[in-house]
Amino acid sequence: MAEIHHILGSIFRDIAQSVFSSDLYSRDISHYYEQDPLLRHFPTPRTQIEELDVQLKFAISDVILNPTQSVGRESSAATIFIDFSYDLSEHFFDALSDALEGRQGIARDTWRKLNSLEQRIYLRQDLLKYFQRNQGSLIQEGEFQVGEALNELEGLLSRRVKWMLSDSELPDEQVEQIQERVLKAVGLKKQLQALVKPLRYAWQNEGDFKVEVEVLANKLQDLPESILGSVNVKTTIRNYIWSEVEHEGRKWWSLTPE
């Protein structure tokens, strides 16, 4: 038994190999054309495949959850983190607005900056970057590491408050009070703990499947047509040539389309 991507990959490899073998033959006979006084006036023959249509018949023999593949898991986790980053950004700015309400020393331009959509987008992007860069350490064997995320995100949000108030006339002591109040209002630990179950579910149930198939004639000949599947692949051969490339004083050889 094999997987479809192995079979199709082998077919594409053999197609490329057939062109290579044909080019080797053209290379060998080109010497005869060169040396023969009559053949020298004829072009050397070379076979070129412009288009190839392949139909593969198969029957699915087994479908297995493949623990070594994590694309589905990572995609599901990324969706959870995207939603979380959006919600956390909204909670953060709501908490910051409440903490600053009625305070003196906040210029109009600073207040406008604090409540802008642009700042909300920047925070979401920073949160997403954090999850993207640290997803491997944040999810270990399906378990979300709440403590690690809590320490990092508390620091990220505290720094964001301090940076956003850097143009204000508030003393450092008040800025620290605002940081504490915002973090408490956001309830970051509780929000992170709410991610444990959905991330665990995604890790346990969203793995990629390995589909094993039978493609040999003696395995398929007695099977009814109704249970057979097929894949139609139409492909073309695109030729590349080695060319010298120069850019900003540097030269190198590169494969470019013919």
Image (cartoon, helix red, strand yellow):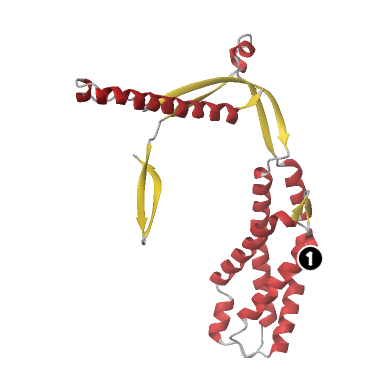
Q: Nearer the viewer, residue 178 or 34?
A: 34
In the visual, does 11 lie left or right of 160? Answer: left
User: x, y percentage for residue 80?
Assistant: 68, 53
Please say if 20 is above or below 148. above
Report the front residue among 5 and 106.
Answer: 5
Residue 229, image x and y in percent? 58, 21
**Residue 239's quadrant in the figure?**
top left
Residue 251 appears left or right of 214: left
In this rendering, does residue 97 appear at all?
A: no
Q: Which of 129/37 is in front?
A: 37
In percent of the image, x 58 and y 86: which residue is there? 167
The answer to whether residue 59 is left or right of residue 24 is right
Where the N terminus falls, by quadrant?
Answer: top right
Which residue shows up at 68% across the image and 68% down it?
Answer: 91
- Residue 94 appears anywhere in the view: yes
Give the residue at the far top of this rendering. 222
Q: Eyeballing the image, is 72 above or below 111?
A: above
Residue 174 pos. (x, y %): 71, 87
Circle 1 Cα neighbour tier, 10 Å, few/some/many (<14 / 14–19 / ≥20):
some
Circle 1: element type: helix
Badge 1 is on which residue?
A: 189
In the image, residue 126 above or below residue 14: below
| Residue type, mark 1 in image | Lys
At horizontal 76% and vertical 43% (from top left) the residue drawn is: 204
Please give the name of the residue rendered at 74% of the width and 83% of the height, measured from the top-left corner.
177
Q: Quadrant of the C terminus?
A: top left
Q: How many marks?
A: 1
The quarter holding residue 238 reads top left
